[in-house]
Image (spheres, rainbow, N blue to C red):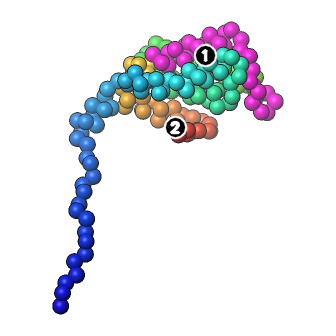
Amino acid sequence: MTRQAFYTPPRRPALARAPLDIAMANATKFTSKELQGIMEPVIQAHKHLREGVATEMDWCVLASSINIALQIESQGVVRGLAEHLHSAEKALQTIAQRASITGTWIPTALYYQELDAVSTGVELYQYQCEQLSAAEFKRAINAAVGEIRSTGGRVITTLN
C-alpha cells in the first residue's frame, strides 16, 4: 500500500516588526510628504470656503481639523492656542448655521472675522501637525472621534 503525500506549502511566518521599529515609527515626526497629505484636503476646503463655494463636506473637513487641533491642545503637546482654535470653531458653527438655514446646504459668503478666525485655525493646525509624532496625531484623532460620538455627532470616514 502506497502512502499518498499531500502537498503542504512551506510555513511562512507573519512578518513581525520589532518593537523598536514600531516605537520609532510612532515617535517620529511627519515627513513633508506625509504632512502635505494631511494638510492638502484642509487647504482645499479652506480655499473653497474662502471663495464662497464650499460644500458641506468642505465644512466637515475644516470642522474636523479644528476638533483635532483642540484635542492636540488638550493633550498638552502644543499648548497656548486654545482661544484661537475656539474662535475658529465658533466661526465654523456660525457659517454652518447660515449655510443650512433653508434645510439644505447653500454656500455662503464669509464675514471678515469668520475668515480670519478660520484662516488662523488652519495655520495653527498645520503648525501643530508639524510638531507631532504619528502616535500623538493618532491619539488626537481618536479622542476627537470619541468626543464627536459622545455628543451625538456623526462621524464620516473617508477613504483615499
Marks 2 and 1, Cα distance to the nearest angstrom? 24 Å
Which x, y percent locates residue 16?
Answer: 25, 47
- As drawn, the label of residue 160 is 2
Write down the region rendered in magenta: 99-127
Which x, y percent locates residue 38?
Answer: 48, 27
Amino acid type at image mark 1: Val
Which x, y percent locates residue 117?
Answer: 61, 13
Q: Which of the 4 image quadrants contains residue 44?
A: top right
Describe residue 150's horizontal placement relative to residue 143 as left or right.
Answer: right
Inspect this view and state whether residue 24 appears: yes
Describe residue 124's horizontal placement relative to residue 100 as left or right.
Answer: left
Q: Nearer the viewer, residue 49 or 145?
A: 49
- As drawn, the label of residue 118 is 1
In the image, is residue 100 part of the stretch drawn in magenta? yes
Q: Residues within 10 Å of mark 1 (few under 14, many from 20)?
A: many
Helix, strand or loop status at disc 1: helix
Q: Which of the 4 image quadrants contains residue 91?
A: top right
Counting every numbered tag in the picture gives 2
Amino acid type at image mark 2: Asn
Which x, y percent locates residue 7?
Answer: 25, 71
Instruction: Tell me which residue sits at (27%, 34%) in the image.
Output: 23
